[in-house]
Image: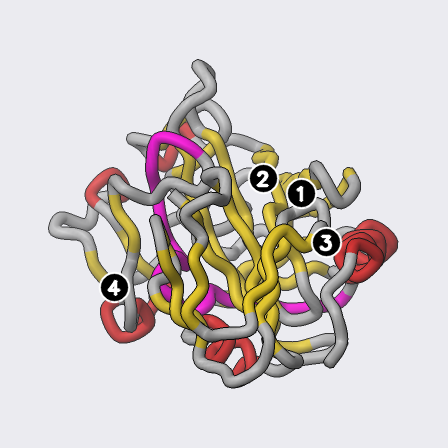
Amino acid sequence: MKKFTLPFIFLFVSLLSFGQLDDTSWKLANSPNALGVGPAAGDYSWWAIGDGGADVRPCIFDDVVTFHSSGDFDIEMDGSTWVEPWQGNDPEGCATPVAPHDGSTTGTWEYTGDAASGELYIGGIGSFLGLAKVYNDGELSDPADAVDGITYQVTFFTADSMGIDINYNPAGTDNWHFEYVKTTGGSTSISEVAVNNRLVYPTIAVDFITVDTDEEVSIINYLGQTVLVSETNEVNVSALASGVYFVRTGDQIARIIKQ
């Protein structure tokens, strides 16, 4: 069984820095925390989409973002997305996209950073990841106030999935989290990512997690360090510090939040 080691995480993020996003397309993952918000990174206690988010909000889960190697950034909404009261749609729901957050303008993208701190900048009025209303200094109340650039934190990245965070309170609190899966470009296996998302229960844990495996389980932090190894699929994580961890068993990887 292959071990998930420090070089493994650094490899993926290094590839991201040198073009891993080039000419790839992504959409929101159909996972419980694909959309989540809370007082701090890793804490989605205010609201999260939950299981089956693609069934609840299909018009946003089929939106596709593309990172072109030229530096251009596109959003394709196929005529419908999730539109909220601040955009004139009350109650919120699936509706025709509202300019400038309608994908009609080509934006730009740039990734900088390393394994510990990656930033993904999306430029251009109306260009965004996750939700149109969220930017670095707050949440929009009028489409006319759209900003011309937003910086996101890449919290995890693999060949087929990535996590995006944005702190939207200048005071340093309040955080939205978005999870994406790759749809085209490079190595793609959306079905495998979906399985991995359901590999562990619960995904937000306090004391124990249950892993769907009969193999050894390793818990890895964001530095790529193995912090816990279990020979059973019932893993006691109570001693771990609060934060986000990878769970690896065999060739499968999942992600948990330790509270």
Q: Are marks 3 and 1 in contact (CB under 8 Å)?
A: no
Q: Disc 1 designates what residue?
A: 120
Image-quadrant location for residue 229? bottom right
Q: Amino acid at mark 4?
A: Cys
Nearer the camera: disc 2 or disc 4: 2
Q: Please tell me which of labels 2 and 4 falls first in the chain.
A: 4
Label 2 crowd bin: few (<14), some (14–19), many (20+), radius 10 Å: many
User: Marks 2 and 1, Cα distance to the nearest angstrom?
Assistant: 5 Å
Image point 49% across, 38% down: which residue? 241
Q: Please tell me which of labels 4 and 3 falls first in the chain.
A: 3
Q: Are marks 4 and 3 in contact (CB under 8 Å)?
A: no
Q: Secondary structure at mark 3?
A: strand
**Where does the image place residue 199, in percent across and percent down from the top left?**
45, 75
Q: Please tell me which of labels 2 and 1 falls first in the chain.
A: 1
Q: Amino acid at mark 1?
A: Leu
Q: Disc 4 designates what residue?
A: 94
* Quadrant of the snapshot with the N terminus: bottom right
Q: Is residue 95 above or below residue 186?
A: above
Q: Disc 3 designates what residue?
A: 72
